[in-house]
Image (spheres, rainbow, N blue to C red):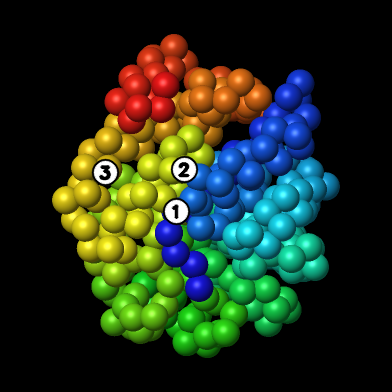
Amino acid sequence: MFSGSIPALVTPFRDGAFDERAFRRLVDWQIDQGSSALVACGTTGEASTISNAEHHRVIEVCIEQAAGRVPVIAGCGSNDTNNALLHMRFSQKAGAAAGLCVAPYYNRPGQAGLIAHFSHLAENSDLPIVLYNVPARTVTDILDETVVELVRKYPQRIVAIKDASGDLSRVADHRMGIGREFCQLSGNDELWLPHAAAGGRGCISVTANVAPRLCAEFHEAIAANELKRARELNDRLFPLHYAMFSDASPAPVKYALSRVHDWVTPEVRLPLVECSDNAKAAVDAALAQAGLV
């Protein structure tokens, strides 16, 4: 259903408010640069510190500005099942292609709770679901057998997974348990190449915010089985992958975008603050190596 370079878009702020004008420019630039889909209101979009009204407006603007040129995956995750369903119902009405639903965080449900949570979403909304497994942030791991059970139970509803577990063996586990056609997307930029080699279809990427053309070309090289070219691009992008997490995300990527485009500010919302001088130096060096500044 999805493939290629899919940026998990930042939510630009200016003077503390959602900068709609900058976001519209970001959406246009991403599409022009070859991004195959867009994610609005994911982790990189600071979904945890925007209100529901802002959350829905960001999704609405992204879909409106994309205007059908690429699909939009709306961040719909929550540690409150009813709030996740609220986001899904809004996103479906707004025209989203799918909802990105992270494992509930903080309350740490067990596997039975995860099955109940995602089952409730699948049974009460027609919006396709992209599971999002990122145990480092949620402290909850959607185990392989849970993914298999959910997809087998709701094959028309649960259509993909963004896996940021860092465990590459899961790509084969999911392929064996569900089938080769199940859409698996890497949630780790630095693991995109081996994830693709194992059977992944693309990456929901942080780095693609600032290097969309290079990330799109990287995917094209992988898809064409041009391994030498893919390795060259991977080497060029690799320092940037790590620089994006040289401080609390998304502060480094917002700083990087402010270096590439003067219409994006590095503003983040508390409890996050702008990235440190050391992180800025790492970003600057990585941008230079990638040929972006």
Mark 3 closeness class: few <14, some 14–19, many ≥20 residues within 10 Å: many
Q: What's the amino acid at mark 3?
A: Asn
Residue 180 seen anywhere in this rendered image of the structure: yes
Residue plotted at (58% across, 53% down) = 38
Q: Secondary structure at mark 2?
A: helix
Q: What's the amino acid at mark 2?
A: Pro
268 relative to 195, above or below: above
N-term mark: 1 or 3? 1
Out of 79 and 62, give the one closest to the viewer. 62
Q: Mark 3 and mark 2: span between their CA atoms?
A: 13 Å
Residue plotted at (48% across, 81% down) = 151
74 relative to 21, above or below: below
Determine which residue is flagged by label 3.
234
Q: Residue 88, image x and y in percent?
A: 72, 66
Query: Which disc number belongs to residue 5?
Result: 1
279 relative to 213, above or below: above
Q: Secondary structure at mark 3?
A: helix
Q: Residue furthest left?
A: 228
Q: Residue 227, image x and y in percent?
A: 19, 56
Name the image quarter holding residue 85. Answer: bottom right
The quarter of the rendered structure image containing the C terminus is top left
53 relative to 130, above or below: above
Q: Residue 212, image x and y in percent?
A: 46, 43
Q: What's the amino acid at mark 1?
A: Ser
Q: Mark 1 and mark 3: span between their CA atoms?
A: 13 Å
Determine which residue is flagged by label 2.
212
Residue plotted at (43% across, 17% down) = 280
